[in-house]
């Protein structure tokens, strides 16, 4: 009888194993060893249960108590591409390519509101299939030694954005106005967004059993990609929204870092010498106020973007490079002074190949200029905490190319530049295990 019971149990366990394998196979390249936290070939040896959180102390980011400098990239499309089996391999391919260049942080979208493959189908209603795709992105990032900056909303209409939230409220008859800037001041929409925030932050990854708010693979949350509120150029509306949402995020999750996601434009409370750094007087009227926005106590580091092609339409390369130095240096200095000691990260920068007269050497010069400023700040222990290129793509992703996209394997000079920056920053992270791995496996 005992033997029969044991045989029955073995049959049940065997069936359960087959079901589990089939279940996980639906997610493509997910490593079935991850529940045991075993690293994949070539992954960081530090990938265990004790993976530390990146922290902030004053104007520096810290990992294991030592300065942590970001050499990272943007691939906004990871969750979207992880949904469909045919495109899922691009996620692993991208993390593998990034890790191969020593890149340590990737910024990507953790939102898709009402669009194709939407994560949030309607206010408070989510597609579990898409959530599982995001789970996979987090797992694959950790497997390749990469941390994530997850952006939580979009000022632009792509992937829904604030326009979708305003449309939902208006269609349901609870919206104050059809303006998409109502995202920032309409009580109903603010409640919609808080439901989304709580759902995401407390999400339990079905592959690991770890809630997002407890997963150190996530370096930081970003409230919104490039927030602007042009209907209130005083900046008061956006400032109140940032304060409210930052406080709400921190009420749920105090372990992760938090940033706003602004482009860095100086606003009404900035002194004239700072306003003059803006690429044009019209940038003063977007409802942004970099110093004021970034001073909020619940914001751990400031973010800026840099697109001289879009901002300086008639400038030549020399003028653009001069602006690069002025723009990045000014904001890094703000971190040390105006912000009272707070890290500043260049979370997007790029040069489009679609500009008339483009040459690859121009892009190389632009990126090197940015990386040199970051490196110099890091060497002296300044507030410049790193930079993240917009954007990298895997091979055969032409539909996602936007003029800025770089496939590293197809651009040897860029691949070399990105790798060299990883190595330069790793040498400054004395004794930190992740830096040792980069120096050994990437820098030789």
Image (cartoon, rainbow, N blue to C red):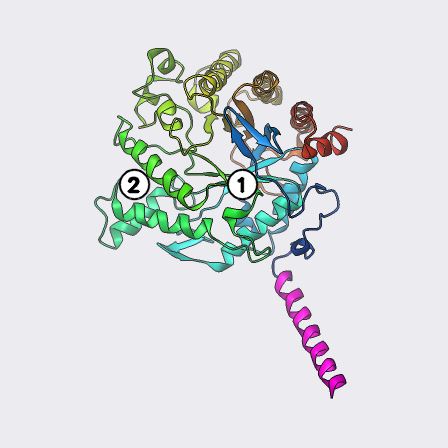
Residue 113 can be seen in this image: no
As drawn, which residue projects farthest toward the bottom? 1
Above or below: residue 3 compared with residue 36: below
Q: Nearer the viewer, residue 323 or 336?
A: 336
Q: At which x and y percent is residue 201?
A: 46, 48
- Label 2's element? helix
How packed mark 1 is, by other alpha carbons closer than 10 Å (few <14, some 14-19, many 20 or more), is some
Q: From the image, tell me which residue sits under label 2.
A: 180
Q: In the rendered image, which quarter is residue 419 located in?
A: top right
Distance of label 2 from label 1 (alpha carbons)? 26 Å
Judged left or right of residue 168, residue 387 is: right
Residue 51 vertical placement versus 443 (above, below): below
Q: What residue sits right under mark 1 in the picture?
A: 400
Would residue 1 be found to the left or right of residue 119 on screen? right
Task: Please report the residue visible at 53 percent of the width from the left and 47 percent of the height from the top.
Answer: 214
Q: Horizontal placement of 50 versus 162: left or right? A: right
């Amino acid at each position: 009888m005992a033997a029969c019971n044991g045989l029955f149990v073995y049959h049940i366990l065997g069936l359960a194993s087959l079901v589990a394998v089939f279940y996980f196979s639906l997610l493509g390249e997910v490593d079935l060893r991850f529940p045991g936290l075993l690293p994949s070939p070539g992954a960081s040896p530090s990938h265990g249960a004790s993976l530390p959180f990146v922290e902030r102390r004053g104007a520096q980011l810290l990992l294991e108590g030592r300065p942590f400098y970001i050499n990272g990239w943007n691939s906004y499309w990871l969750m979207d591409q992880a949904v469909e089996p045919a495109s899922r391999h691009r996620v692993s391919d991208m993390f593998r390519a990034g890790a191969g260049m020593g890149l340590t942080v990737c910024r990507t979208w953790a939102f898709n509101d009402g669009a194709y493959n939407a994560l949030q189908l309607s206010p408070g209603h989510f597609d579990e299939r898409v959530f599982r795709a995001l789970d996979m992105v987090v797992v694959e990032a950790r497997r390749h030694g990469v941390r994530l900056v997850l952006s939580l909303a979009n000022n632009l209409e792509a992937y829904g954005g604030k326009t979708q939230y305003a449309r939902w409220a208006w269609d349901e008859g609870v919206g104050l106005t059809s303006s998409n800037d109502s995202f920032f001041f309409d009580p109903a929409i603010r409640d919609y967004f808080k439901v989304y925030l709580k759902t995401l932050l407390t999400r339990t990854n079905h592959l690991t059993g770890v809630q997002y708010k407890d997963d150190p693979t996530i370096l930081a949350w970003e409230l919104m990609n490039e927030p602007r509120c042009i209907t209130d150029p005083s900046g008061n509306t956006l400032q109140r929204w940032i304060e409210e949402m930052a406080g709400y995020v921190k009420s749920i999750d105090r372990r992760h870092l938090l940033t706003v996601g602004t482009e860095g434009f100086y606003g009404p409370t900035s002194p004239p010498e700072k306003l003059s750094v803006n690429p044009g007087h019209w940038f003063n009227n977007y409802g942004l106020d970099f110093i004021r926005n970034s001073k909020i106590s619940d914001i751990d580091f400031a973010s800026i973007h840099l697109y001289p092609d879009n901002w300086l339409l008639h400038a030549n390369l020399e003028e653009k490079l001069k602006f690069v130095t002025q723009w990045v240096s000014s904001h890094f200095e703000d971190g040390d002074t105006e912000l009272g000691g707070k890290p500043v990260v260049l979370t997007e920068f790029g040069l489009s190949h679609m500009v008339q007269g483009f040459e690859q050497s121009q892009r190389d010069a632009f990126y090197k200029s940015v990386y040199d400023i970051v490196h110099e700040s890091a060497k002296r222990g300044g507030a410049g905490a790193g930079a993240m290129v917009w954007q990298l793509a895997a091979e055969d992703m032409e539909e996602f190319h936007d003029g800025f996209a770089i496939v590293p394997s197809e651009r040897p000079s860029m691949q070399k530049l990105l790798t060299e920056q990883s190595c330069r920053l790793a040498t400054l992270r004395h004794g930190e295990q992740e830096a040792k791995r980069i120096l050994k496996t990437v820098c030789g």
